[in-house]
Amino acid sequence: MTDQLKQNQINSAAWAACDIFRGVVDAGNYKDYILVMLFFKYISDVWKAHKKEYEEKYKDEPSRTYQQLEREEFKIPEGANFYDILAQKEAYNIGELINDALEQIEKRNLAKLKGVFRVNFNSESNLGKPAERNRRLKMLLEVFNKPELNLSPNRVSEDIIGECYIYLISRFASDAGKKAGEFYTPAAVSTLLAKLAAPKSGDKICDPACGSGSLLIKAAREVEDHNYVLYGQEMTNTTWALAQMNMFLHSEGGAHIYWGDTLNHPAILEKDKLMEFDIVVANPPFSLEKWGHENAASDEYKRFWRGIPPRGVGDYAFISHMIEVTKKDTGRAAVVVPHGVLFRGKIEGLIRQSLIDDNLLDAVIGLPANLFSSTSIPAAILIFDRSRELGGKNNQRKDVLFIDASSFFKAGKGQNYLEIEHIDKIVDTYKNRKVIEKYSHLASIDEIRKNKYNLNIPRYVDTYEEEEEIDIAELQKEIQQLEKDLVDIRSQMDVHLKELGVEI
């Protein structure tokens, strides 16, 4: 069986498990139960395989098997794996038993899983009264015990499990609608952002609004070897837990994912200062209203020295943070923003002017509308390159590349998609700073100043298509001929109707 077939089978089987909760539990909640159960099943299957391997190897020395299992970096305590719970699926307190097993696993693996299982399988408010809750949990255990969801290492790779996890998150995003923006960036947008940021071996990579961590994983995949370090921060605790599990499933157990509010309580620090990174990528919440304006003036890290963004619009707060944690003279930041960031005035206009005058802005890329399940508005990507600063290798670069990719997408039912050819065209145009008619333009800083620092893409990329000139005289002749033809047709119809005895 090919990996792709296995992938499709596992994806379908895992998604089918959601039928147990659909219509009863909100998609924003049932995703946590399904994803935790997938994780529970995976680590149990891996542990079961390790145990079997050692039992066969040391069949005459049971104590050696125990010793080897104890040396494993990750351990599941006796009685706490998926199959131990499956055997008790008829128990009246099955929800408590699942909670207890997960708690035991967390305690034995605190370095990797502390605080990850933030979901209550004994919740009456989410899963119903005892009889109904027990029925659903029994069904959930049985679904994950199907042959298609055998997640043993000799059957499926970590990549397949990780991709199934991302597949489920993307499907949950569609179901959750506007809430999806809290935890998911479409895979194609993540891929595009990662390729534009172009991390390399040895880089420290950060996403200060990391959601479930998929963008960080995409960025890591752009590095040819495993010589990188991942950092992220996420405000919503259940989404932070998803990110931790996502990292584990993608063999990124060394990633540092922090729980907390990046704008008000940045947690990624080094010697009590903001840690700096080679690459910073993010798809922060668009125009966040309650972003912490009241705390910005007294920010101990002085992130908002270019200006304090408006009270109810936090876009430039995230941008300011990202710039400040990007390494001076060498680092790069890439961020997804709503189009208002490009042209809004007042304090946002002054912050934008400061970034441009300091020669940090490298590119503005317009994306198609309706790419995100959380909003139908078109978005843009801003790329900031600190190697353009005095002392950086690109300090002589005094232009900004504008790309209008808004018309290049695959239309889907209710949502549009970027395909690989669309991504490749954007990346190639950016990396080679190509000027392509009706697609991209290199604007000098002086040109931007003449436009009063307005970065609205149509000011720089003219996509207007001239309409074909109409020959009025020729058109009139065609109309006259059509009228004559119509008279002839009516005459023929009259003859046919009379032959049929129809009175006219």
Image (cartoon, rainbow, N blue to C red):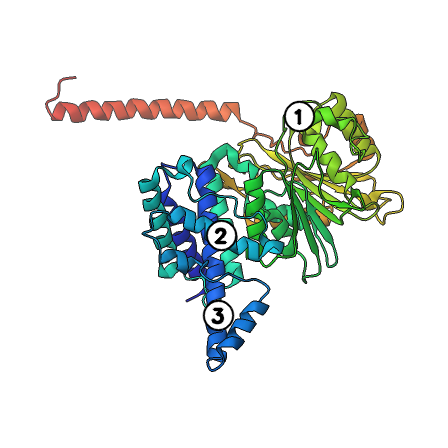
Amino acid type of the residue that numbered disc 1 sits on in the rendered structure: Val
Quadrant containing the C terminus in the rendered view: top left
Q: Nearer the viewer, residue 277 or 223?
A: 277
Residue 254 visible in image:
yes
Q: Which residue is mark 3?
A: 51
Q: Which residue is mark 2?
A: 102
- Residue that extends furthest to the bottom in the rendered view of this protein: 60
Distance of label 3 from label 1 (alpha carbons): 54 Å
Q: Residues within 10 Å of mark 2 (few under 14, many from 20)?
A: many
Distance of label 1 from label 2 (alpha carbons): 40 Å
Amino acid type of the residue that numbered disc 2 sits on in the rendered structure: Leu
Secondary structure, mark 3, is helix
Which dot, 1 or 2, sits closer to the camera?
A: 2
Q: Residues within 10 Å of mark 1 (few under 14, many from 20)?
A: some
The percent position of residue 313, horizontal first and vertical second, equals 66, 25
Question: Along the horizontal axis of the image, is 61 left or right of 462?
Answer: left
The percent position of residue 371, horizontal first and vertical second, equals 54, 38
- Residue that extends furthest to the left in the rendered view of this protein: 501
Asked if the residue at tag 1 contacts the one at tag 3, i.e. Cβ–Cβ closer than 8 Å, the answer is no
Quadrant containing the N terminus in the rendered view: bottom left
Q: Nearer the viewer, residue 214 or 147?
A: 147
- Residue that extends furthest to the top in the rendered view of this protein: 504
Q: Residue at x 36, y 61 (%)?
A: 147
Relative height, residue 70 to residue 98 (above, below): below
